[in-house]
Image: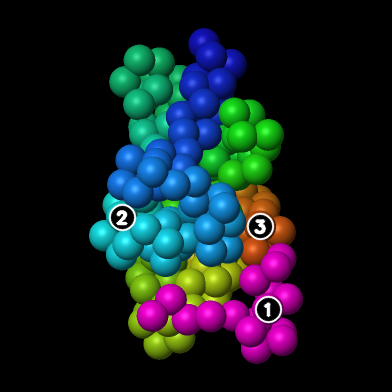
Amino acid sequence: MILFFLLFAYLLGSIPFGLFMGYAVKGVDVRKMGSKNMGATNVFRSIGKKWGILVFLLDALKGYSAVVLPRHFYPETQNTTVALGLACAAILGHTFPIWLRFKGGKGVATSLGVFMAVAAKPALITFLLWCLVFALSRILSVASLTAAYFFPLAIILFSKGDPGFGLLLSGAIALSALITFTHRTNIQRLFKREEKRLF
């Protein structure tokens, strides 16, 4: 059953809402526009603000659902180890979807969703930091990278002593590494001062 739900989490995470939104709203492939990414940021720039926000929310919701829904059918998935496995599966599904030759989004919104289900308080505080940094910089990559690097600290500050703390911290560090990897081109542009503000 756990293997089934891991597959479920991966497949749910791999739903390309950004791609669907491009076709549904303007009949375009967002992978051929702007940054050529199917994530919320590119949808925001290429299709429209409200559609980008909607994709962000849907990507977060699929991550949250990938962890929470199995609990209603198989209580053993509440175990921290299994919950983190489901979280990882959903994030990997979004970032490396089998349907799209393993070329997906950058994983920020989906990561927010899964960790709201696994470690709500650290995730919420990290999201508030993301909002603050974005409001000040108006550069999504700066906000996302800052949040990714802060998240392990948030786990230490607010989840120390919780069951599975070591696993949570390891997951947070792994997430930081993944977000760094998916934002590698953004980091290059930041060093060159070529990264664009969202508005």
Q: Disc 3 vs disc 1: Cβ atoms closer than 8 Å?
A: no
Q: Position of residue 74 (x, y in %)?
A: 40, 16
Q: Is residue 127 above or below residue 73?
A: below
**Would you call the spot at circle 2 few (<14 residues within 10 Å), some (14-19), or many (20 or more)?**
many
Point out the tag, 1 or 2, that comes first from the N-terminus: 2
Q: Disc 1 vs disc 2: Cβ atoms closer than 8 Å?
A: no
Circle 2 residue: 51
Q: Residue at 53% x, 14% y: name it.
A: 4
Tell me which corner region of the image, top left, top right, bottom left or bottom right, holds residue 66. top left
Q: Which mark is residue 189?
A: 1
What span is colored magenta in the figure?
Answer: 184-199
Q: Disc 3 vs disc 2: Cβ atoms closer than 8 Å?
A: no
Q: Can see residue 118?
A: no
Q: Residue at 56% x, 50% y: name it.
A: 31
Residue type, numbered disc 2: Trp
Q: Nearer the viewer, mark 3 or mark 1?
A: 1
State the separation of the CA atoms marked 1 and 2.
25 Å
Circle 3 residue: 182
Q: Quadrant of the C terminus?
A: bottom left
